[in-house]
Amino acid sequence: MFELSPRVKDLKQQIESFMDEHIYPNEKLFYEQVKQNKWGAPPIQEELKAKAKSMGLWNLFLPHSERGAGLNNEEYGHLCEIMGRSSIAPEVFNCSAPDTGNMETIERYGNEEQKEQWLKPLLAGEIRSCFSMTEPDVASSDATNIQCEIRREGDEYVINGTKWWSSGAMADSCKIAIVMGKSNPDAPKHLQQSMILVPLDTPGVTIVRDLHVFGYDHAPHGHAEIKYENVRVPVSNMLLGEGRGFEIAQGRLGPGRIHHCMRSIGVAERALEAMCRRAAERVAFGKPLYKHGSTSENIAKSRCEIDQARLLTIMAARSMDQFGNKVARQQIAMIKAVAPTMLCNVLDRAIQVHGAAGVCQDTFLASAYAKARTLRLADGPDEVHLGTIAKLEMSRYL
């Protein structure tokens, strides 16, 4: 269906083989090791990271950068789908969120000192990072609401505020946060915010608690509520410059949404495979489940919806590559509104076919559903993206 270059075909085949040989067989062991050391790096993960790195299956994202693999958004999208099939796979290839978005941010907007100090170890897979934007006391879907204060005092910035849903921050390996805050409340609306690098061991940074998603703690990465209380960092930690936070956010979230959506398509494919196997094996009322009308209809709907979402996402990625994120913003909004909802629907049908097994720990379906439902909120809720789509569509007529 898609014309892939020889190199991308080769990478795709290598990743598929790696998944079959090393990822799927070790999923159970991964979570057993997590139980032994909740926020530490599971030994099997570190073993597989070293193996992937030695094979050159590493840092495949980061388009238009000599530090990346030389793939554009569309090419990486096809690989991202395969990685998305397992929740433990993206980090093995050093392609997991929020690190990919943070690395792209530092690569695109950071200075050489920031890149040496933070981008280099992130690209090496030696540390992890988090993104502190969402706040508990305001509707953070509107980034202009952000209340966290970034105030300059001499050669330092002082940061005060509370953030939550800083994904990845619970991990012992998480060392740096990109914090979005308000540096000039009197500036024009979209020039009030800034982004700044804050090492998590800085005095005044407190991990208040880990947050659960439908009861899942998502160890070993987790999601944290973080209090920044009179946190002082050097002026040199500012990204791009004061008042550029909203600009950075728009640039950062475009590629990240492609990654989320392609990973979602990978999960949906795995869920459909599980649904079909279950429908072929289980017998109810004298015939296999797939011969019951409602089940066959759900299989068909799922196939259609997955392929539709993939085509839309690849179209958005191609538009980003050809015309840039700003021109592609409607397509980016469309995929973010479509793919997570599609995944929720496919997983819901797969759970229904599996019956009680679908809602317990014996399959990946329940935990995948919790993540999929959360994705309809992360990186902007459905309503924001639908509003953007409608606004851009109506602009042609007004």
Image: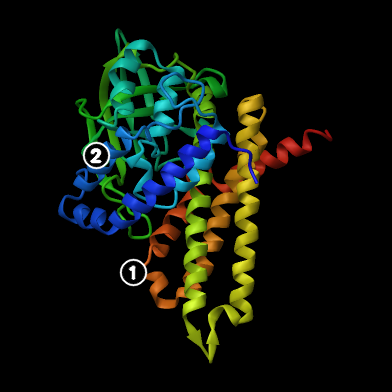
Number of marks in the image? Answer: 2
Residue 379 in sight from this viewpoint: no
Taking depth in this image into account, of 116 and 272 the one nearest to the observer is: 272
Numbered disc 1: secondary structure: loop
Whether 91 is drawn above or below 228: the answer is below
2 vs 1, front mark? 1
- Where residue 42 sits: x, y (%)? 21, 47
Q: Position of residue 245 (x, y in %)?
A: 47, 23
Q: Is residue 326 above or below residue 259?
A: above
- Residue 389 placement, left or right of 19: right
Query: What colour scheme governs how the chains and residues are painted in the rendered image of this protein?
Result: rainbow
- Which label belongs to residue 207? 2
Residue at x 53% of width, y 42% of height: 78
- Give how far across and how far down residue 43 sits, in percent: 19, 45
- Residue type at tag 1: Asp
Return the x and y of residue 218 as percentages of the image width and height.
Answer: 31, 51
Disc 2 residue crowd, few under 14, some 14–19, many 20+, Cα 10 Å: some
Residue furthest top as drawn: 154
Which amino acid type corresponds to the residue marked 2 in the rendered image? Answer: Ile
- Other-residue count near label 1 (Cα within 10 Å), few / some / many at <14 / 14–19 / ≥20: few
Residue denoted by label 1? 362
**What residue lies at 27% left-to-right and 59% top-to-bottom?**
28
Q: Earlier in the sequence, mark 2 or mark 1?
A: 2
Relative horizontal placement of residue 261, taking residue 49 as reference (left or right): right
Measure the alpha-carbon separation of dots 2 and 1: 32 Å
Q: Is the residue under label 1 in contact with that under label 2 (CB below 8 Å)?
A: no
67 relative to 100, above or below: above
Residue 311 visible here: yes
The circle on residue 236 is: none
